[in-house]
Structure formats: C-alpha cells, structure tokens
Image: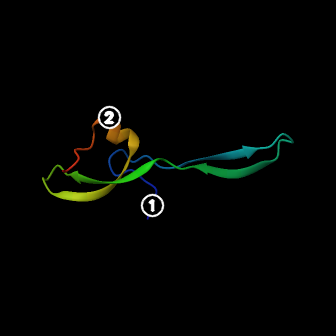
Amino acid sequence: MSQECVVCGKKPLYGHNVSHANNKTKRRWNINLRRVKARLESGEVRRIRVCTNCIKSGRVKKAA
C-alpha cells in the first residue's frame, strides 16, 4: 500500500541524516496519513487514506 494522500497526492519526502562527522545516510519523512470514512463526490461512502492536513482544512467530507 503506497504512502500517498488520495486527496492532494502528497508523498514522503527523501533526504539524508547528517551526523556531526558529516556522514550522510538516507532517510525519509513519512506523511501523517489516516484511514477515514469519507463521502466521495459521487455520493458513495468509502474508507480512504488521507493526510491530516486535508482533514484539518476541510477538503474531506467525513461520513457519520
């Protein structure tokens, strides 16, 4: 299952851990995803993986 928001398409960011000795190892910053029961534009209710930023901003209509 991919780490991607269904609404905005946000994905993990990649970079390096940098030590005091300037050694670089790969790392990634995962996004904060939640499984939410949401009402889609077609009217159906479905569980989707959405980032918390989309939930907070109201881009997702939660189903009761």
Which residue bears the numbered disc 1? 2
Query: N-terminal of the two: label 1 or label 2?
Result: 1
> Where does the image place residue 31, in percent across and percent down from the top left?
49, 47
Q: In which quadrant is the N terminus drawn?
A: bottom left
Which is more toward the observer, 30 or 37? 37
Compared to 46, does 31 lie above or below? above
> Where does the image place residue 32, in percent across and percent down from the top left?
46, 47
Q: Residues within 10 Å of mark 1 (few under 14, many from 20)?
A: few
Compared to 12, does 58 lie above or below? above
> Where does the image place residue 50, in percent across and percent down from the top left?
36, 50
Q: How is the image coloured?
A: rainbow
> Where does the image place residue 61, in percent across and percent down from the top left?
22, 44
Q: Amino acid at mark 2?
A: Ser
Q: Residues within 10 Å of mark 2 (few under 14, many from 20)?
A: few
| Mark 1 vs mark 2, CA separation in Å | 22 Å
Q: Residue 57's quadrant in the figure?
A: top left
**Residue occupying image coordinates x 31% and y 56%:** 48
Which residue bears the numbered disc 2? 57
Q: Is residue 14 left or right of residue 25?
A: left
Q: Is residue 29 left or right of residue 25?
A: left
Which is more toward the observer, 62 or 19? 62
**Residue occupying image coordinates x 26% and y 44%:** 60
Q: Amino acid at mark 1?
A: Ser
Single out the residue that lies furthest toward the bottom. Answer: 1
